[in-house]
Image (spheres, grey):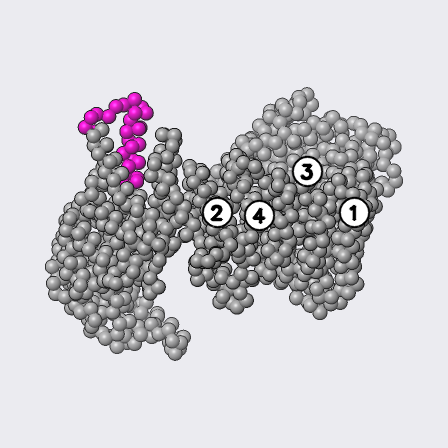
Amino acid sequence: MSDDFERALLITFDYTGGVDATLKERANVFISDIKKNPDVWRLCCERFSVTAYIEIKFWCLQTLQEVIRSSYTAMSDASKTEIKSALLTWLQRDCLNLKSGLPTFLRNKLAQTIVAVLQFEYPSCWPGFFHDLISAMNQGEGIVDMFCRVLVSVDEDLVSLDIPRSQDESKLSMHIKDSMREHSISDIASAWYALVDLYRTKRPALATSVLQTMQRYVPWIDISLVAHPKFVALLLSLLESSDTALAAAAADCLTEVVSKRMDALPKLTLFESMGIVSKCANWSGGIPLPSSRAGVGSDGAEDDGLDEEGEGLLGRCAHLLATLATEILDSLKRLENGVISLAAIGLSVDDEAAVEVKGGSELGSRQLAALFPVILTAFKSGVEEVALPLMPFMHAYTARLKVQQKRSQGLPAEATMHIHAILEGLAMTSRYPVDSACEHGGVLPVSGPELSAAREEQAEVEEKRRDLFSLFKNISKIAFAESVAFVTAQLQKATSPPALGRPEVTFQEAEMAVVLLYELGEGAPEEALKSDSGALGQLAVALMQANLPSARHRLVAMAVLETYVRYSKILQHHQNVIPSAIMTFLDERGMGHPAEDVSTRACYLFARLSKLLRNNLRPFVPTILQSLHPHLSRIATRPLAYSDTLTTMSSNTSAAASGTGRDGGAQRVGAALVDDRLYVFEAVGLLLGQEELPAEEQYAMLTALLQPLREQIDSNLAVRSFNSPGLILQALEAIVRINKGFKTDLCIRARPQLGRMFMVCLETAIQVLHVYPSHKVLRNRFISSVHRLVECLGTAVLPMLPAALEALVTTQVDAPDLTEVLSLTNQLILKFKEAMQGLLQSLLPVLIARLHTVLTAEWEWSGRMAAPAAVVVARAASTTQNGSTVSLEEGRECGELQRSYYSLLHVLVHTGLSRSLLNLPPGILDVAIKAVTQGAATHVDATVRRTCMQILQRLVSDWCGGPTPPSGSPSISTALTPSGMSLQSPQSQAAPLSEETVPGFRSYAIEHFAGGACLVGLMVSGAALFDTRDAATMALIGEAAVSIKMVHGTCGGDQLLSHMCGNVLPSLGCPSELQQQLAYHIRESEAKELKECLRAVMSWRIQSAQQSLQVQPMLRDQMSEGSR
């Protein structure tokens, strides 16, 4: 069996693919059966010692660990003893030699298995475990290594609360900690000291492992065990060890000691006794590195030969320094706040306590003063590994200065020096590195690795700057003058011409100076931004007039453009500076920059600048347009490509050339949906759309802009090439952006020739839909164009709308397309109201018919299919009529279309255009009214139900003129079924409102609106969906009350009450008392009282349904009992 076992187990560990899958499956089954044996642990103990395969050994340890965790408590004492004996034998026999013993992964697994036993045995049955392990370490270095691995496993598997644990596991963690504190931790700490001292030079790697293990335990053990003079002296001496890893581990241990939670005064006293402050203060000339390696000095110079381990040690030492300084600062804060808090509540501090607090404050202040030189040196080093760990301290120190400034109305004398040094450190650390991947000044590199490196570096710098600039802004709030002086010096250095003996300004320095000015402007005082006397205003003007070195560098150019926009208000008072500032956006430093991200950003920022300086830029409009001409032409004729997510919209490129099929796949080559370069057209529109410009000059300039765009559309409609849709999209969007700058009064009344130019553009745009009828992006862009031109041109667009809307509706469309059309129609109705009457007579029949084609007979008008949960159920249970499964996205899109449909009808009837519905063909009006009624009765959204009820309310008001139909009017059957209505829509002129405009509608309103939607719908589906305590539900009940009162007063009160009491309420099982109350309130009360009555009826219905659900299981149980 043993041979079969080994062969099977080795097969299961084979991942080379050389073993037959069937054989491997049989081997897995064989091994799985073996693991099910309760005595499998005996096999593990036996095979581990005799096998030569490390795979077998690993399986034995893994299986043994699983058995211990699941079944150890149920084992006999003899079995437990046998397992413990085997584990200790393996530890002392197979782990004795580091080089020839078990490999690392088996050592770790053995340690984990021992700890699995320990959680059940310690301390009750095995109190001397750690003592025995410590005693065995004199056998060899391998046991020392296992001592560390066992302690690491104890921390990871049992003790550490950094790992999420259950409540029982947390209790076990506390139990183990308490037991170790009581029985073992003192011996363990002594062993740590002895081992580190022994192996620091003999085997530094082993000493490093001991310190890394110790670091895990410092947070929860007695601090005196590791912070006594001998141990601290050892750790401090190790900071200068020739072994970098050992020095880093010592720094980590000291950091844990320093950060251990303690009261303020004892902590400061501990630091003094440790001598750690004086040790760190000696680093004022630079944080040292081991042996002969150079550290980071006060000049920020770093040894060129510094490797990754050296950088890591620098970071650890910097972290130690930052933690020490932060803890001192926090202790000072707690001491001071304690006294202040007592004084605030009227309590005094006794003399002894006051002396202690004063002494502690003086001690902490001395310690902080001793550390500041090295802190500032490290922060100014420009080395991220050293400077960034100090950021938490810098934030804390700035907050302390803010408090001190508030308390004493000023900053301490030494604070100014500190602030200047901190600002220098901020500037140094925020710069791009000297060997920057962004060194090239023109465009981003083309090659993959270089491009990736440049983008990665830029992202890292931006991430780093978030925290650094947050600190900068906080400093500027408490020391604004010092911050301005510092930024001024940086800008002067960056803009100074090269001179003999002075190095050339790098792009890093220039970019940093401009960015600091930009950041300083955020939240700056108004006084500082004044153009004549404000310090920032003067700085901004100086920058705009300066000849900045590296101005064409991509990063510098971007920073300059952003800064100009932030300080653009200053240009309102410096008209002479405007030309040079504007040219920065227009020449090779802005839109003409070879880097695409710079030129694109310049377009957007120029649009923002134009909004702010529209009037100031008026004298320069001709010059600006002349300079912009090549950029406008380039942007219009070179659209950005689609993103990858859009390129899959179609792949029929052969059809694209011919313009056939579903737009021939032209979407693949369309313009990007978001092209920030198009903002420049918006800026041009803002500048050109000013009434103060001479009319002829304005007309000529607008013609020069629009004519090429129209020609671009016309030529591409004629050619219909692969790239045509993208060029058409770009031109359409450019026209819309230009139009944003023109007001309706200017285009219609003051200068109608401008409006006619945009009308010609709309005529051209309509042709796009005829050539590309189903191109989704072109449709959306055209609809947005109509939206915009309607706002600008007003009623002047009415003659153009029939052709536009007809093209939108008659093409093959889906739910999202129709939703967009309905949104546009809503805007038109709200904008033009009665003027839309003629257009709606031809549009509505086609639009509603198309809508009901998309929302097929299978569509659930309750809106349930638009809910994700309902779609998932439907997808699992059924398919649509054509056999395709229900799609979550399709359900959502159809749900949006249904809402837009109701919104259109709501706008239609509430703007006096309900007569337009009477022109619908026979059958179309029926399905439209049925859809609204179903929404009012069954929709899952209470707000949608209210909308539908309001539509029907207005139709009742408009179409039911009196309580009874006039004699001789055509009548219809009132026995309407859910499958349809028998409404007859007259094609002749509508009857006067005093008559029943739609014969049979009164009866329909009584039965299906008041009785069906308002009462049955509310009590049946509404009671299952809504809560009467919800505000939306109460609003729905109120709407239902208003609707019932309207039908009662308009369509015949006696017929309504007869239908309610004779049919509806009895069918609901409503008690006679509630029926009488409801009938009374319908006949006599106001809508408010009827609302409360409906609420009572609905509450009764909900309670009845709940009781029925409780009774049904009882009935089933009784029937089951009777059958037995």
Q: Residue at x 20, y 40 (%)?
A: 269
Q: Name the N-terminal-most of marks 3 and 2.
A: 2
Q: Residue at x 37, y 35 (%)?
A: 411
Residue on which the image places disc 4: 544
Residue on which the image places disc 2: 516
Marks 4 and 2, how far apart at CA: 15 Å
Amino acid identity at mark 1 = Glu
Amino acid identity at mark 2 = Leu
Task: Answer few, some or many: residues within 10 Å of disc 1's Cα (few below 14, many 20 plus, some between 14 and 19).
Answer: few
Q: Is residue 158 visible?
A: no
Q: Which disc number belongs to residue 926? A: none
**Whether label 4 touches label 3, CB < 8 Å:** no
Which secondary structure is most common in the magenta stretch? helix
Mark count: 4
Q: Name the N-terminal-most of marks 4 and 2.
A: 2
Marks 4 and 3, how far apart at CA: 60 Å
Residue numbers of the magenta segment: 328-353
**Going by the image, does 995 lie left or right of 617?**
right
Q: Residue at x 25, y 48 (%)?
A: 281
At numbered mark 1, what does the secondary structure look like: helix, strand or loop?
Answer: helix
Q: Nearer the viewer, mark 1 or mark 4?
A: 4
Q: Residue at x 41, y 52 (%)?
A: 428
Residue on which the image places disc 1: 697
Residue on which the image places disc 3: 948
